[in-house]
Image: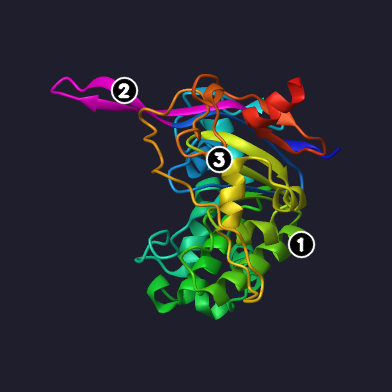
Amino acid sequence: MSESLIRVEDLKVYFPIKRGILSRTIGYVYAVDGVSFTLARGETLGIVGESGCGKTTAGMAVTRLLPITGGTVLWQGDDVVKMGKGSLRRLRREMQLVFQDPYSSLNPRMTVNEILSDPMDVHGLYTGKQRRERLAFLLETVGLSPEQGRRYPHEFSGGQRQRIGIARALALDPSVIIGDEPVSALDVSIQAQIINLLMDLKSNFDLSLIVISHDLAVVEYICDRIIVMYLGKIVESAPYKDLYGSPKHPYTQALLSAVPVPDPMRKKERVVLSGDVPSPIDPPSGCRFHTRCPERMTICEKEIPEMINFGGGHTAACHLYARATMQ
């Protein structure tokens, strides 16, 4: 079994809602509410779901860029929540981020070389000739020329900017890269280039990846295992072949039914969900998906479903299967 680099157990991230002159807390946004998963060395893990499901918050909390309300995040056995500034700085050399927007994630007043040098300055790495060689190597690795390092971000296309963002993530030679919707702001043809680049980098640099996305076609192509989130909770987790070949949870089935099929002769039955996504400030009781689920039962409104293990690393939280197991 592969070594687990990251182990997340019962992760909770709540954002307080404050009102009044005294800024009293009157409630919470339950962005992530009891999420557990692992990332093995060399694995690509996908986290998918609709906007507002908590997938980005979970990814940011793993690096402690967002405060953690409860639960445990372990990095090779060390508790990230309890790390001091020194340990946290060393951790962030190992875990780097590629952000969604290649425009706003780069400082327009800095050249590309300055952008790539910034993390090296923070961590005291590479000086003089070593620095110049490292910068040239990073740019060539992501498909740019060393001469382009003297330019500013506005002189590049969206795909080139995202390549610069990936180069910055590689600057400190990390073990894990977390991509928050890394291709959603790009044209489809450029998306393919960036996805292929990430796959090549994973192989060449022995990286582990967490890819956060709402695009199931993207995660199917790049990920080994996929987690499906809905309103702050994991509803299904499986290797990508099992998830796409035999989805168990009604929410996963609905998401997959919306993925376009590039074959005009093939008919695909669409699962249309009723209603809107409930507010994370006041999530529904029981199963959080029951207000929109076409398979809902009375028990769904009252009891939180437990994860059912279907074997082979495929799990889903749904009362339909709990009932079948009991019979």
Task: Give, as a three-letter code, the residue at label 1.
Answer: Asn
Is residue 17 covered in magenta? yes
Q: Dot 3 lies on which element?
A: strand
Q: Position of residue 293 (x, y in %)?
A: 52, 38
How many angstroms separate mark 3 from mark 1 (CA)?
30 Å
Q: Residue at x 66, y 71 (%)?
A: 266
Determine whether, in the image, residue 137 is placed left or right of residue 92.
Answer: right
- Magenta segment range? 9-30
Residue 57, placed above or below residue 68:
below
Is residue 142 covered in magenta? no
N-terminal label among 1 and 2? 2
Q: Dot 1 lies on which element?
A: helix
Residue 48, placed above or below residue 137:
above
Determine whether, in the image, residue 235 is placed left or right of residue 175.
Answer: left
Of tags 3 and 1, which is closer to the observer?
3
Task: Give, as a three-letter code, the residue at label 2.
Answer: Gly
Q: Position of residue 153 (x, y in %)?
A: 41, 71
**Which residue is more in the foreground, 125 or 209?**
209
Residue designated by label 2? 27
Residue designated by label 1? 204
Q: Position of residue 204 (x, y in %)?
A: 76, 62
Which label belongs to residue 229?
A: 3
N-terminal label among 3 and 2? 2
How many angstroms separate mark 1 from mark 2 (CA)?
47 Å
Q: Residue at x 67, y 28 (%)?
A: 307
